[in-house]
Image (cartoon, rainbow, N blue to C red):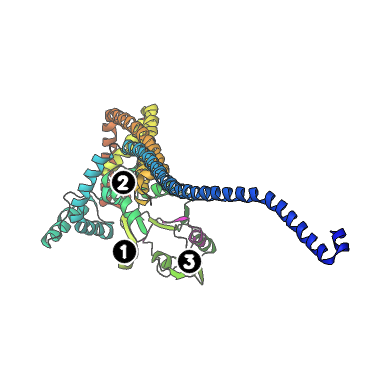
Amino acid sequence: VDSARKASPLGGALAMWVKALVAYKELALTLRPKTLAMEEKDKAYQVVAKQLVNAQEELDYAQADVDTMQSEFEETFAQKKRLQDETESTKRRMVAATALLEALEGEKARWTTEATLVEVQKQRVLGDCLVASCFLTFCGQLGSAARDKLLKFDAVVDLEARDVAVTGNLSLVKMLSDDAEVGEWYLDGLPGDDVSRHNALLVCRSVRWPLLLDPQGIGGAWIRRKEEGLKILSLDDWKLRPSSLKFMGTLEECLMYGKPLMVEHSSGALDVAGTPLERVADKRWKQTPKGLVVRVGDQEVPVDPKFKLYLCCQEESPDLTPEISTRLNVVSFAITQHGLEEQLLQQVVKAEKPELFSKRRKTQEEVNACMQRVKALESEILTRLSTTPANLLEDSSLIEALSNTKKTWREVQDRLKIANDTEAKLQSSYEDLKSVAERGSLLFFLMNSLSGISRMYHTSLSHLQRIFTQAID
């Protein structure tokens, strides 16, 4: 090219063009196969791309099927889990139901019977409550015969005339108390006759404080054993007047701390009018933000709801004003012949067969403890059944508690049966000595009846008991 340019400018240009053509040809010869190969590859790519699109579509369809099956699998698995949980829950409920049936075995018949009795009693509850109210209000001072006449004849006839149904031969002891409480009264020294049990009801169930007419000291002795922590004030002590500092201090202490208080008086009517006891006897409590208070003297004293007041007069027939009868519940604790027989029988057995006396006392305590335990267990069962918020079969703690309670209840019932059988056998052993107690009781009432001729013939029960004990010894 340089030589051609030197020879002729046009020759140089022509030489450059020829050289470029040669170079182009050489490049075209090299590029042509590659172009053809690229076209082939592009055609192959188009085929493969189309196959890829088809494969992707198939994959999408397959993935959709997989997702559907996965969803069905998860739903089926969840349903299986629910069924397994329901199966386990059903098994647990079956076990719980079996345990519950075992725990309440034997109760259905008794509860069904009691429910039937309650339905019958509901029809007579008004009349029965009226008779009980009549008893608590008017029968305190009456003797056994007068009480029976008022309750079993006068009150019943009057109610029936007004078309008010009343239970025939209504047992006030069963209506207003239970065997466990009556057993406690007996262990505390209350005689076992009906009059004494009725007196106990008058003392424990009346809304008014009791005034015990207690010539033989039976009621006072019972109260002393019954009330733990009892404070006693005797007005026979000339230094102990209702206005004295000791009297006031003891009264305030009992009111504040809920202690039982017994005020004794040997003779004459125990009239609380005009004394610090008046407001207390009338229960003239006043409600304050801090609780109940009552004015005693010139100050207000807090009143604990557990406070109890007993007034005791050792005369059988004191002069009672109408105000006393309306303010207090006057209860005659004059001993009956049957009640004295029982007390004297205890003395005879204690002297003649001390081991029998101790065994019977222990048996009576065991019977009473069993009855109290049975009462508490029955109450616990009914309370749990009525207060559980959830399904009974879902409350495992309730089922366990009921099973334990039922087990304990059965043990107590077995012990109670044994104790009752023992008590029946011991009672039959008492019959051999009963005639001695009957004659002692008869002699006391014969001697005591002489006081109707002259008071100089009055005989105290304690004196008779001393003579009776000397005669036995």
Question: Is residue 356 depicted above or below 92 in this figure?
Answer: above
Q: Which residue position is annotated with label 1?
A: 325
Nearest the eye: 446 or 15: 15
Task: Please tell me in which quadrant of the rendered image residue 128 appears.
Answer: bottom left
Residue appearing at x 52%, y 60% in the figure: 253
* Residue 341 in view (yes/no): yes
User: Which numbered dot is residue 24?
Assistant: none
Q: Is residue 301 left or right of residue 24?
A: left
Asked if residue 466 is among those painted magenta in the image, a careful observer would answer no
Q: Choose between 375 and 410: the one closer to the eye.
A: 410
Pointer 2 residue: 178
Q: How crowded is mark 2: few (under 14 residues within 10 Å), some or many (20 or more)?
A: few
Q: Earlier in the sequence, mark 2 or mark 1?
A: 2
Residue extending farthest front: 7
Q: In which quarter of the image is residue 181?
A: top left
Q: How crowded is mark 3: few (under 14 residues within 10 Å), some or many (20 or more)?
A: few
Q: Residue at x 21, y 59 (%)?
A: 126
Instruction: Give the image location of residue 207, x and y in percent.
Output: 34, 60
Label 1 near label 2: C-beta < 8 Å? no
User: CA separation, marks 3 and 2?
Assistant: 32 Å
Residue 265 in magenta stretch? yes
* Residue picked out by circle 3: 291
Going from N to C along the chain, the mark reached first, 3 or 1, is 3
Q: What stretch is highlighted in magenta?
A: 251-269
Left or right of 44 on screen, residue 313:
left
Q: Is residue 277 above or below residue 119?
A: below
- Looking at the rendered structure, the kind of residue marked 2 is Asp
Q: Where is residue 175 in the image (x, y as percent from the top left)?
A: 26, 50
Quarter of the picture containing the N terminus is: bottom right
User: Is there CB contact under 8 Å for labels 3 and 1?
Assistant: no
